[in-house]
Amino acid sequence: RGVFDTTTQEEGGGEAAVDSSEGAEDDSSNDDVTVSAMPTDDLDSLLRRSRMALERSRMTWSQGLGNVHDGDDYDDDDGRSNDSSKNEKRDAEYRSGVGNGTEVGVAGATAITMAPGAWNQEEYDNENQPISRQSYFDQGEQQDLSGYHGEEAHQVHQGPDIGKEHSSRNNSAKRKAILIAFLVGWMIVIILVVASISVGIPRRNNPTGPTEAPTDARTRVPTIVPTEASMEAPTATPTGTGEGSTASPTKAGVSERRRREIVAETSAISGAEVVADPTTPQHAATEWIIDDDSRRLEPTDPQFRQRYALATVLFATDEDQTWKLCGSAGTVSECPTESERFLSDSSECDWYGVICDSLDIVTKVELQDNGLSGELVPEFAALPSLTSINLSRNSISSEIPTDFGKLESLQELNLERNGLSGRIPSAWPPNLENVYLQRNALSQEIPDQLFTPSLTEIDLSGNSLTGELPQELYTRSTLLRRLDMSSNSIEGSLPRGPLSELESVKLSNNRFSGELSGAVFSSSLETFDIEMNRIEGEIPDEVFSSSTRLKEFNVGKNQMDGTISADFGELSDLEILILSQNQFRGTVPSTLGKLSNLVVLDIGYNNVEGSMPRDVCQLLDVSLVYLASDCAVNGGSSEFECECCTACYPIFG
């Protein structure tokens, strides 16, 4: 092909188009140029048109196009003559290497003839005939091309650099093709990476793929409406979601895969038979996790187990929609904010009564006095970081799950004032500090495992417990500060071991027998209440010598005897002193008048004699509110007189 393709128009026509390769332009840019004398305006115009034509030439070659093809016939606009003789002449010159330049003729203008290493200029008259020519060649030989003029534009190119030009062009085209392929390849890689990230982010936030339309929290039949969020391949034979379902097999497969994995996980927590039973709260919680929970947690999520456990608690204790605050959606319970409602879209750490640490791990469940009914569920054991459970003052009626013993971090358990029944579990966490199970219907013996080394407070009052106090009370729970076993059916002897940290002992209304041991009285003791038992003997001296901080001393309704010690007057902090319904004898010591903090004094139904000391009566003006003795005569005579008593026990003759 020639270096230039040119089109020459008649005078008054449009501009001429000149095509050139980059290689030719570079080769010619360093050659000397000889220009014949011509008007400056014409030269500037011609150079401007030449630069424009060269620019279009580069664009044309970059697209791999050429305007001259050997053996093709073109019309006048393409630069080839329709005259066959002229075409044959040009073709022969092209093949034989005669041509060495390009001649452009325009009537009344200047023509430029170019070849590699050469620049020619000719002037034409108005008849389009050459009138002068100036040439400069680095190599090659100038050829008379005057026969190529008129209305046609033509190109003849031959010279020693033609092979180099073609090779340069071919190499340039190959380099461009390789570069384009390289860029296209990288673009594809970038698109794939961006697409993967775009799909991966929503999967991490919503890892399960399909989005299910939320239904009522108590609905146990799934209503899945899959979206484009997940396109995983099915892992099982796909099934539809019901009659008229439009779910694709792929999405159906994803849903089935997720269901199987969740059921497997909840079955590992609660047992396969329990989860499969449609009447259990575990089944309801599993179906809610699968179908209705908009958070779409996967079983591998750190929050999955605790969310399932708390959902199970809700389904187990709100079956009759009795929650006062923040029950499930659709119930009558009120809630400060909807985000606090159980089974809401928010994190379970935002639910009412649920407390989490900085890592969103549940550490406390506090749902006291909230109208809970139903049963306690073992799924609390799925909360391994749980330190406190407070479900007190509700209406829960079930046994205490043995799985509570698996809560190794549990420090406090408060289930007081419910309807719990059955036996107290024998397995308990070693770090348990406070146990409150009072006012339930628990029965049978107290397990010795309940008295852990870290136990500080235990209240089992108001149950139907039997048997004796475990020896571990003295040997293991040496840090015990508060002990309340009142209103049970416990028998045997009272505590005998040293409990130096003990501050309160309440064992009233039981079946304890024997004598009162002085070993239980320590310097920390403030409350001692053993009313309504079968205790015999006298009051030990350790009561006065060791427990100087006593505020309450109640041994009423037993079988104790002896005299009322004058040393009671040394217990300056004493507020309640009840000695009634025993067999105490003698007189009432006047030293009791020194007890300026005394509020209750009851010595009725004993064998005391004489009268109430004046110093004691004066306490009614200081602190004393209730003063009772055997001062009422009903058909008989009284051996004790009390003019200031606020209550008198009747004496029957």
Image: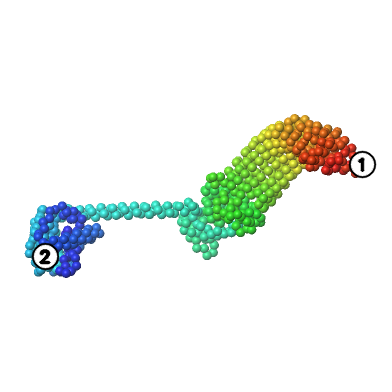
Element under label 1? loop
Residue sitting at x 47%, y 58%: 228
Asked if disc 1 and disc 2 are in contact, CB closer than 8 Å, the reply is no
Element under label 2? loop
Give the image quarter of residue 95.
bottom left
**The disc labelled 1 sits on which kind of residue?**
Gly
Quarter of the figure that contains the N terminus: bottom left
Alpha carbon distance from label 1 to label 2: 163 Å
Q: Nearer the viewer, mark 1 or mark 2?
A: 1
Please indicate, yes or no, whether residue 250 appears anywhere in the rendered image: no
Quarter of the figure that contains the C terminus: top right
Asked whether, in this view, residue 21 is left or right of residue 652, the answer is left
**The disc labelled 2 sits on which kind of residue?**
Tyr
The percent coordinates of residue 207 (x first, y second) are 49, 52
Report the residue marked by disc 2. 148
Asked whether, in this view, residue 648 is left or right of residue 401, the answer is right
The percent coordinates of residue 79 (x first, y second) are 17, 65
Give me the disc on residue 636: 1
Asked whether, in this view, residue 113 is left or right of residue 300, the answer is left
